[in-house]
Amino acid sequence: MDSLRVIQIFTDGSCLGNPGPGGWAYIIQDGQQRREGFGHCVETTNNRMEMMAAIEALKVLSACQSVVLHSDSQLLIKTMTLGWKRKKNQDLWAELDQLAGMHQISWTWVRGHNGHPENEACDTLAQRAASMAAFSRGAQIRK
């Protein structure tokens, strides 16, 4: 593992209603390279979308990376750092544990909607993805 190279990951999840249509997004900053990703789910919860953002970002990385993962989800950060009890979403926690075990990760909480550029950009992407899910759900209902 290259101890000098640290990859910065910023994640966010959004849900229109809880449960409801949701979206997730990430930004990966690796030196001068920046990658973005997002996706959606027609029926989900905000917590699932926060977790999916981290999962999908970690899937992009090759093994054994040094990572700082930033999220405005206290549930995500405190579960991964302080061992908060995992009451729901066992499927996603298991996947996140598996992916996190492949890397050296520092989990960092950032205050949401507080002007942090990457967090705001992830929020915008996640909201757009949630809107796409809402549109998809609406289209399915009309059929």
Image (cartoon, helix red, strand yellow):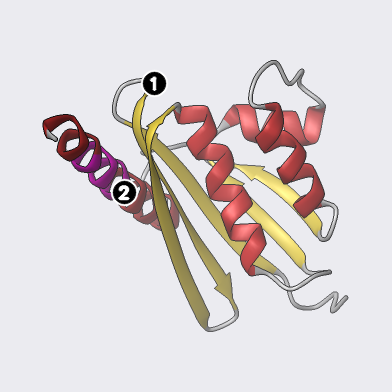
Residue at numbered disc 2: 129
User: Residue extending furthest front?
Assistant: 143
Figure quadrant of residue 95: top right
Does the magenta portion include 133? yes
Q: Kindly state the secondary structure of the residue where label 1 is placed.
A: loop
> Looking at this view, is 143 or 104 the one in front?
143
- Type of amino acid at the residue the image marks with label 1: Pro
| Label 2 crowd (10 A; few <14 / some 14-19 / many >=20) | many
Distance Cα–Cα, label 2 vs label 1: 15 Å
Asked if 117 appears above or below 111 in the picture, the reply is: below
Q: Residue furthest bottom?
A: 32
Give the quarter of the image for residue 140: top left
Given the image, on which type of amino acid does mark 2 rest?
Answer: Ala
Question: Which of 13/29 is in front?
Answer: 13
Residue located 48% across and 38% down the image: 49
Residue at the disc numbered 1: 19
- The quarter of the rendered structure image containing the C terminus is top left
How many discs appear? Answer: 2
- Is 136 situated above or below 34? above
Residue 81 screen position, x and y as percent: 78, 35
Query: How packed is label 1: few (under 14 Cα within 10 Å), some, or many (20 or more)?
Result: some
Residue 85 place in picture, x, y as percent = 77, 18
Residue bounds of the magenta highlight: 128-136
